[in-house]
Every structure is written in C-alpha cells, then in structure tokens.
Image: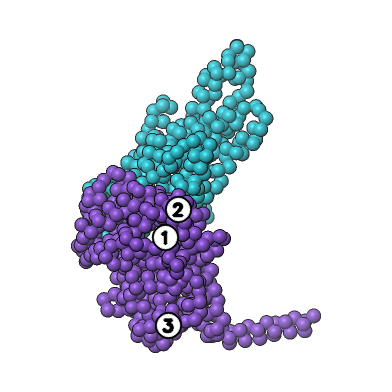
Amino acid sequence: MNLYNELSKKYPFLKALPFLLPFALVYVIFLIFPIFRGFWMSLHRWTMIRNMGFVGLDNYLYMIKDPAFWESLGNTLMFVILSTPTIVIGGLVLALLANQKIKGQLFLKIAFFLPYVLSVAVISSIMVYFFQPHSGLLNGILQSYFGVEETIFWLGEANLAWFVIVFATLWWTVGFNMVLYLAALQDIPESFYEAAEVDGATKLQQLLYITLPSLKPITWVITLLQIIFSFKIFSQVWLITGGGPGTETRPIVQYIYETSFKQNSMGYGAAMAFAFFIILVIVSMVQIYLRNRKEV
Amino acid sequence: MKKSLFFLVLVTLLIGFTTSAFAEAVTVEYWNLFGGGDAEFMDAIVEEFNATHDDINVDVTRLEWEEYYTKLKTATASGNGPDIAISHVTRVKELADEGLIVPLAELGESVGIKWSEYNTNILNGAEIDGEIYAVPLDTHPLVYYYNKDLLSEAGLLNEDGTPKIEGSFKDYLAKLKADSSAKYPMTNWTKLTAEGHYRVWWSLYNQLDGSPVITGKEVTLDKEKAVEAIDWMKDLYDKEYSPLHSEYMENVNLFRNGEAASLLTGVWITGTLEETEGLNFGVIPMPEIFNNRSVWGDSHTLVIPYARDIDEEKQKAALTFAKWATDHGELWAKAGHIPSKNTVIEKEAFRNMPYRLDYVKAADYVKFDSAGAYTWGIRTEITTALSKVWNDQITAGEAVDEAVTAIERLISR
C-alpha cells in the first residue's frame, strides 16, 4: 500500500487508473477491438461464417472500381447536404416558436418533441401509409380536396423519394435539436432584452443582434452532431423506400449491410465499412480544426 | 412448525424426483421465421404434436424473417444452432454448401419418412448433388385470385366460376378494364425495390423456357427471353392493367376493396382473403401467358443444422416432428400453403377446404430460382434493373445487359 502511495505521488496517473479502468475496458472490447478486427476482416475473403483466405488489398481495389460503392456514398453525402441545414434550422425555428410567451407554449413543446420518442419502425410505417400512391393519405387528400387528377408516386421518383426521406427525418428528429436550442435560449440573460427595449430596439433587432449571436456556440455543436448523425442514415431509408427507386436513395450503410449479410460477403463489407470510418474521422477532424481556428 | 417444514421439504423433493422421472422426454429446439397467420397455425401444429407425443417436447423460437438467415447461420456456425429449423428451399443449397445442414435421406428413413410420398417437384429442390437435405413442408407459388362479382360484370365468368380467358391474357384484362366497374383489372406487388416484380418476371421467363441465370460461375441468362418477359410486363404497367408502385399491403387491399378486379400474389394470402367480408373471390394457378404454366414459387422445408456433438436421438426426435408436421399438412394448409405430400392432398380434411384444391396443381408448375449463395444477390440485381425500365430510364435490352454485368461482378468477388 505504501508503495502505491509513493508511486502515485510520483505518477498521479496511477491514482486515476482504478476509476478509468471499468470504462476503458468496455471501450476497448466493444469499440477499439472491433475496429481492428474489422480491418483484419477487410483483408480477407470472409463469408458470414468463415475466413476463406487472405486477399490483401483486393477488397479495397474492388471497392474503388465498384460503381455501386460510389453511388451509395454519393447518396449519403446528398442526404447530409439536404438534411443538415433543414434539421438544424428547423430546430431553431421551432425553439423560437416554442419559446414565445404565449398560451399553449407547453403544448407546442410537447407536440414538436413527441415524434422523437417513436421508434424508426413506427415513423417509417406512418410515412409509408401517408405517402403510398394508390391508397395513401396524402394522395387521397390531394385528389379529394385539391382536384389533383394524376397519382403522384412519392416513393417512385428519385427527387420525391429524397423529399420524403428528408421530411420523415425532419419530422422524426427535429424535436431533439429544438430541445437543445430551447436550453440555450433559457441561458440568455433577460437583462439583455430589457436593455435593448429601453434603447428602443425592435423585436427583429433583438432577434438579430441578441438571440442569434448568443446561439452561435450551440449551433456549432448541433451542426456537428447532425452531420455525424446524417452520415449514418440507414433505417428510415431501408424501411420507407428500400433504397429505391432502383438504387437512387440507397445510402452507403445500406450497401454495406446488403453486401455483408445478404450477399454473404463480410470481407468486402468490412472493407467498405472501414473506408467509411476513415471518411468520418476526416470529417470530424476538419470540424475540430475549423472550430479551434475560430476560437483563436 | 418444524414438523410441517420437514413435511414440506419432503413433498418438494418427491415432486422433484417424479418430474425428473417424467422429464426423460427429448427437447427439440425448433426455429422458424413465421409471422402473422402463419405463426399461429404453426404454433397450433407444435402444440398438437407435443400433446400427442410424451417422449418428445418441441420448443419453438420465432425469429424476425428479415434477420432469420443471418441468425440461423451465425448461431449454427458458433455451435448454438437449433435442432431443427425452417428454411426456404431456395436457401437449402446455400446452407448445404456452407456445411451448415446435414443430409437426411437415411436418417429420415430410420424414423419412417417415405421420400417417395413427397411431391417430386418440391423434393427435387431439396436435393443437392444427389443428397436430400430438407423435408419439404409446403410450396407457395404465385396464383391468380379474381373477384367473381367484377368478372361477371364484364361477362368474363364461366358457369363453373372460373375466369373466361379466351384469346390472350391481355385481351382478357383489356375487356375487364373496359366493362367492369373496377379501377384496375389486376394488381400485383409493384413497389420498385420489392421482389414482387422479380417474381412475375421469373414466372414469365420460365414460361418462355429460359435457362438458369447462372450455371456454376458463369452467367447463362437467355437475354432474348429475358427481354421478351420484361416487354410484356412494361406493356402491362403502361396500359395501367396493373398499377405501378404499390406497397405490399396496399396491393392486397386494392383487391379486397374491389378497386382491383384480380390479384397476382402468393397462396399465403388465401387465409386473409377468406376473412374479408363481402369479398366473393375465386383462385386459379397463374395463367399460361407464353409456352407453359411455369410460375415463381418457394417452399418451406425443415432442415437439421449441423452440430459438433451429434446427438442421434435428438436428430431422430426432430425428424419425427418433421414427419408428423408434413403428414398433417392439412393443418398447415389452413394458412393457404399447398401441402408437400400427395397423401395429404388425398385426405378428406384437405379436399373439404375451399379454394385450396383450385390451385393445388400449381405445385407441379413451380420453378425454383436457387443459385446457391448468390440467390439473393441475383434477385436484387434483376429487381433493380427492372425498376429502371418501369421508370423509363433504360430499355429492356439495356436492363438485361446491366443486370448481367452486375451479376458477373457479384460472382467474381
């Protein structure tokens, strides 16, 4: 015991070790190890159940020449570009609405947040019921009340399918961003607004010069989270459009899943997953770099 | 107090001993992928089997069908597989090639299975390199359901209640569209990414006597016939004889509501249609559109996963269940499936069921599309290529070329 005391005086790190160990162990077993294991698998031909032999970088070479890989990676990027601003701005607008001192404020907060608690399977079923062409709710409304003659194939045309996916994701997850913004809004001191009012600032000026600048740090955090979240898009696409029409909305995660588990090709799946992992690491590093530069 | 406590312990011990004496029954771990109505009928079969067999206890685990094969394969490979499991016949080759299931010919005979009693067409699907790997339970091909009221509006119903298809099938659909009050003459599962398109295409391609998509490691698709089948379907959708983009339940409901006069889908929907109030329907095997009556279909079979420590007693108990379940195919036919045994089809209990006899012959027309480990990949590549034709992005010929390239890439990996 004495030795431990003496040593930990010299190396404070030792004192922290017992506290760090439980988490570190779980982290290594469930995150670090699988990453290395995945890389190892990507260097082999590997079916769902066994290793069929070392192939070196063949899987990666195949990937570079695989048009389906690039298409699905492009689709994922497309989703990130479409969904990130929509959902971040959507969250901000809803938070500003719900933060007004009006009657029914609590109702608004609950209504905006409610879809977030639903599971992806539930929201996807709702969306399919809403957008299906021949007996869907939306086409029914359009045809009965707005005199639309033709049947609109919401899930059958690429542009409309993208709209549906972004809409579904917006409706489902915007509540979370709203809550983050609401918390930040509470933190803006009331005195700022009082002072501005005394100086004769309008509501719009208060919004532009007090509220929005104060929300800058949280916006940065929300955008970062949203980009990572959007990159990982899979379930709602799989359940709503199945990646279609054709493969035009198939994201990279779906292609990895299909390759690994449906086409029985874990090695190639692992190669793509690893490449995707590298891309995400780069994206995160760029974000951290940009933020650090701003703070300086 | 002490005395009564002692008594209690004694009684508990006695109960413990006696139950363990009874518990010599073999427990058979059974996995299946059924959902909805199918699951209930299968549970009832297991319950009845357990009630009539003191020495065997079948324990069912139901898994989500989307993830079923992933779980079955990984569990078996790691030595935690079940004693008996359901597999589609088109998956049997894949499982056998991976060494995940065991051959059953002799083992089956030892518990009294007579292989000659099974429908030859289905049994052939379960035979890999001359070895039988699965006990066929049923087959479920596409069949053609029709609304009798709507057909008679158009004067297309025969005296005996069958559809009057004179001339080509499309002429019949045209008349049905023109002369009945139905919005659509027919409906099938046409969501672009869904396998529904592929199933119809596969049926038509085989009605044209098309060759297998791959043979060994080579693509042997007959391009001309593939194109002809696609053109027929494209015309079907262009003329709005069947609406495009319909979700699975949506297309069933169009038929149930009377908005579509007929429905081309699998036999599994019979139970659901029977329960639809006010729906006066009939059913026949898929019509002959080209040279023969070939049709897409799959089949549920029972397989025995490979285990490191082979327990022959367990395997025999599992096969006893397989034999019993297939011998009582009329219980399973309630779900709509066609029984796998000719002896079941002759049973009074089966013959008295409505609708089933009208399509039982389809079992002989079924063409399985098994391509080993590539089955799923081929289905997806063809479905994707087809959907681009429906959306007018490419021609039928280009679609076939695209599918062939994609399948070549798939098998080169």
Q: Nearer the viewer, residue B331 or B127?
A: B331
Check whether the beta carbons of the residues at disc 2 and disc 1 lie within 8 A of each other: yes
* Residue drawn at 54 percent across, 38 percent down: A175
Residue B176 image-quadrant placement: bottom left
Q: Is residue B341 left or right of residue A144?
A: left
**Disc 2 and disc 1: Cα gap in Å?**
10 Å
Query: Can you say whether B369 is above or below A14 in the image?
Result: below
**Disc 3 and disc 1: Cα gap in Å?**
35 Å
Q: Nearer the viewer, residue B410 or A230?
A: B410
In the structure shown, which secondary structural element does the residue marked by tag 3 occupy? helix
According to the picture, the residue beneath numbered tag 1 turns out to be B156
According to the picture, the residue beneath numbered tag 2 turns out to be B180
* Residue drawn at 49 percent across, 36 percent down: A147
Q: Mark on residue B343? A: 3
In the rendering, what colour is chain B? purple
Q: Position of residue A50 (x, y in %)?
A: 31, 65
